[in-house]
Image (cartoon, rainbow, N blue to C red):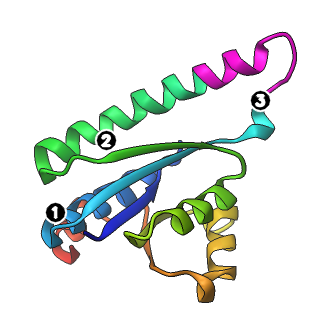
Amino acid sequence: MRKFLVLLDDSKECLNAMRFAAMRASNTGGAVVIMSVVNTDDIQHGFGVADLMRAEARERIEAHFEVFAKWMRSRAKIEPELVIREGDPAEELLAQIAEDGQIGVVVLGLNSDKGGANPVLSRMLRDAMDLPCAITLVPGDLSKERLEAIT
């Protein structure tokens, strides 16, 4: 089964990437893997603070995931898988692709702000020739109707 891997973060464009992945998986008999990365640079160390910060980050990720998962279950009839990793988001995305041979497409949302840099996208494009899967870029300002039409 082909899996669509989508990165869950706090960005606005993440919503369209999730929708696209779910609709494509539903229309093609695939699955969706939603990955979120706890950036270790954001975790303070010492006296149990790091463990507390990790636990809070995981709770926030799981709550965020449930919002998307509920929509995917009801609308796209997809049961998404959640993967939580720690480290640099771009490195962890590449590691997940390497570990899961069923990932066929990485779906990334594009910010409509032309000045905003996306380090994950930059890294993926830099290493695109070495990837064993395709990359789909979904504009963050694409309408729901247009998403439905192209999926």
| Label disc, if present, on residue 68 of the rendered structure | 2
The residue that appears at 61% across and 62% down in the rendered structure is: 95
Secondary structure under the numbered disc 2 in the rendered image: helix
The picture quadrant where one finds residue 111 is: bottom right
| Label disc, if present, on residue 98 of the rendered structure | none
In screen coordinates, is 59 left or right of 141?
right
> Please, is residue 125 above or below residue 117 in the view?
below
Q: Does residue 45 belong to the magenta stretch? A: yes
Residues at marks 1 and 2 touching, judged by CB atoms closer than 8 Å: no
The residue that appears at 68% across and 15% down in the rendered structure is: 52
103 or 140, which lies in front? 103
The picture quadrant where one finds residue 106 is: bottom left
User: Cα distance, mark 2 to mark 3?
Assistant: 25 Å
In screen coordinates, is 62 left or right of 73?
right
Secondary structure under the numbered disc 3 in the rendered image: loop
Q: Position of residue 151 (x, y in %)?
A: 21, 73
Write the start and end of the magenta stretch as one range: 43-55
Q: Position of residue 64 (x, y in %)?
A: 41, 33
Neighbourhood count class around disc 2 (C-alpha, 10 Å): few under 14, some 14–19, many 20 upward: some
Q: Which residue is mark 3?
A: 43
The residue type indicated by label 1 comes to: Ser
